[in-house]
Image (cartoon, rainbow, N blue to C red):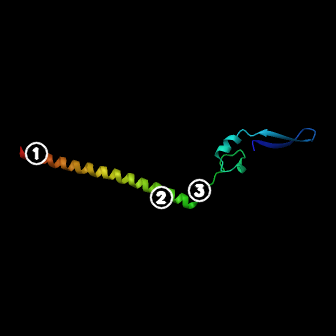
Amino acid sequence: MITKTETRQDGAGNTITEQKYNHLAPAEMMKEDNYNQIDGVISNSKKPTFEERMQDAKDRAKEHNSRKAERHKGAKQTRKNNRHRDENRKKSSHEH
């Protein structure tokens, strides 16, 4: 529905019906799931189910944990490198 119908009364009490162009209709037609929902509001899409939201949360948690493990692995390697560096300094200072 690219036009919407508005009904009003004039000053003499006569009912006037007007067709007005709905300027949001073309944008809505691109976004909405079906054309029965062309009403000037672009938020009529299907909401995710509980299972879909849970799966999304699990996926995000898994991704977060893998990034956290990578950071931990890097920090562990840095500590190991520092420990070897310190041991080598001690050895070289004892040799002199």
Find the distance from the CA under tag 2 to the CA under tag 1.
51 Å
The quarter of the rendered structure image containing the N terminus is: top right
| Helix, strand or loop for disc 2 | helix
Nearer to me, 80 or 29: 29
Q: Residue 60, relative to residue 10: is it above or below?
A: below
Between residues 44 and 89, which one lies in front from this camera angle? 44
Judged left or right of residue 39, residue 76 is left
Mark toward the viewer: 3 or 1: 3
Whole-angstrom CA distance, mark 3 to mark 2, is 15 Å
Indicate which disc, 3 or 2, sits on the residue closer to the N terminus: 3
> Which numbered disc, 3 or 1, marks the residue that appears first in the sequence?
3
Mark 1 — residue? 92
Residue extending furthest toward the left: 96
For image coordinates 81% across by 40% down, the residue present is: 19
Dot 3 and dot 2 residues touching (CB under 8 Å) = no
Per the rendering, the mark at residue 58 is 2
